[in-house]
Image (cartoon, helix red, strand yellow):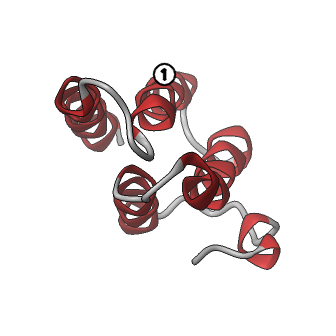
Amino acid sequence: MATKEMVNQSSSFDLAEVKKLVDNATSARNKAEAKPYIERLDFLQATADIKPYTRNVFGELIGFVKPASGRVKDKAHWLKGVKAWLYKLETSL
């Protein structure tokens, strides 16, 4: 589980870390359990040394991760969006 130290770590961009955080957030049992992972994603998106377009794509990915976390109605819809934006993020690097 993510900790406050994890949220405050250096902002170097690591796609493997992003994928793990996305997976942890979307597979969390509830929103509270997903919160530290989403906070870390928000932190990375705001501080990572990436191109503006990539930063925007990353923001859209997070925009789908948030509603896909925990128990939600139509989770498959949100996960489909997460998968699409994750692919766009990978290809924009």
Image-quadrant location for residue 20: bottom left
Q: Which of 52 and 58 is in front in this view?
A: 58
- Position of residue 19 measured from the top left corner of the image (x, y, whole percent): 35, 59
- In the rendered view of the protein, which quadrant contains the C terminus? top left
Q: Which residue is drawn at 43% across and 59% down?
A: 28
Query: In the visual, does 69 lie left or right of 90?
Result: right
Q: Residue at x 41, y 63 (%)?
A: 24
Q: Give the answer, above or below, for where 42 lies relative to 33.
A: above
The amino acid beneath tag 1 is: Tyr
Q: Residue at x 30, y 30 (%)?
A: 85
- Position of residue 48 measured from the top left corner of the image (x, y, whole percent): 65, 49
Quick one: SS at disc 1? helix
- Position of residue 1 measured from the top left corner of the image (x, y, whole percent): 57, 78
Q: Give the answer, above or below, for where 48 lies relative to 57.
A: below
Image-quadrant location for residue 71: top left
Q: Which of 7 and 16 is in front in this view?
A: 7
Q: Give the answer, above or below, for where 40 lies relative to 84.
A: below
Q: Nearer the viewer, residue 68 or 15?
A: 68
- Position of residue 52 measured from the top left corner of the image (x, y, whole percent): 57, 24
Mark count:
1
State the residue position of label 1: 53
Q: Give the answer, above or below, for where 34 lies relative to 77.
A: below
Badge 1 crowding class, 10 Å Cα cut-off, few under 14, some 14 to 19, many 20 or more, is: few
Q: Which residue is drawn at 62% across and 41% down?
A: 45
